[in-house]
Amino acid sequence: MSGCFNTVEMGVPEDATTACSFAIRAAQAEDYAAILAVLKTANFHHIPSAEMPELDLDCCFVAERGGHIVGVAGYKMIVPGEGKTTLMAVDPAMQGAGLGMALQRRRLKAMRELGARAVTTNADLPHVIAWYKKHFGYREVGQLAKIHAFGDPGIDHWTTLRMNLDAWQERDAV
Ligand SMILES: CC(C)(COP(=O)(O)OP(=O)(O)OC[C@H]1O[C@@H](n2cnc3c(N)ncnc32)[C@H](O)[C@@H]1OP(=O)(O)O)[C@@H](O)C(=O)NCCC(=O)NCCS
């Protein structure tokens, strides 16, 4: 495995009305089918494809609840100092409970530990773009036409976002 983390982190959202416990851990080969099932809920399961040639499980975290995988988030280092998020999705039945936040924080931490100072993310859904900006300090830097249907079929492009890991780390530590 390269650039991987096997630590298990427990997450308990602060909102008592949606309280549930879950674990964030490194993905393993036997998780592949369950990961694809979660990605399918967001139409992110077309792998391999031009949009997503492969899913590198060595650089992927999952959220597990009650023995089931309910969330996934991947990343990769593109050049030294530059990270990129790959796919992320949370089971719609589990959204809004903090799993996405925990998965995103975990992969940002992993990229930072690998030397990343900046991270690029492509997203299509407006509320998800707003979520990235609000919580992680992303800024829009461009748009990219989708190569084929992937994600929301009603949106034909990705919004490219970029964030600074040092600035986020300082903000997150407060
Ligand atoms: C993006 C995504 C992974 C976030 O996962 P999540 O577990 O819902 O994330 P969180 O619970 O940490 O945060 C969700 C936000 O939606 C809000 N929310 C509240 N109720 C919600 C609900 N029923 N459903 C969804 N979101 C809700 C939350 O309050 C939170 O916003 P806030 O932190 O600004 O208040 C998830 O929405 C998803 O899978 N989307 C589809 C795929 C996608 O766009 N992935 C990202 C590609 S780059």
Image: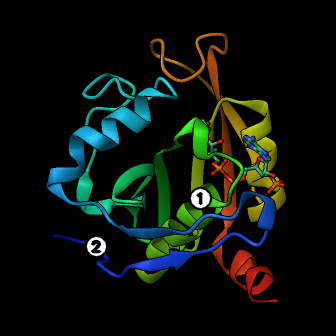
Examine the rendering and report whether any part of residue 8 can be seen.
Answer: yes
Question: SS for tag 2?
Answer: loop
Q: Is residue 166 above or below residue 31?
A: below
Residue kind at label 2, given as amino acid type: Cys
The numbered mark, 2 or 1, whose residue comes first in the sequence reads 2
Q: Is residue 90 above or below residue 171?
A: above
Q: Position of residue 16 (x, y in %)?
A: 78, 67
Q: Is mark 1 within 8 Å of ligand 1?
A: yes
Q: Position of residue 150 (x, y in %)?
A: 48, 20
Mark 2–mark 1 Cα distance, whole angstroms, equals: 20 Å
Q: Which residue is mark 1?
A: 99
Q: Residue at x 45, y 49 (%)?
A: 70
Q: Quadrant of residue 49?
A: top left
Q: Residue at x 46, y 71 (%)?
A: 111
Q: Which residue is mark 2?
A: 4
Question: SS for tag 1?
Answer: helix
Q: Is residue 134 above or below residue 40?
A: below
Q: Residue at x 66, y 15 (%)?
A: 155
In the picture provided, is 17 more to the left or to the right than 154? right
Residue kind at label 1, given as amino acid type: Leu
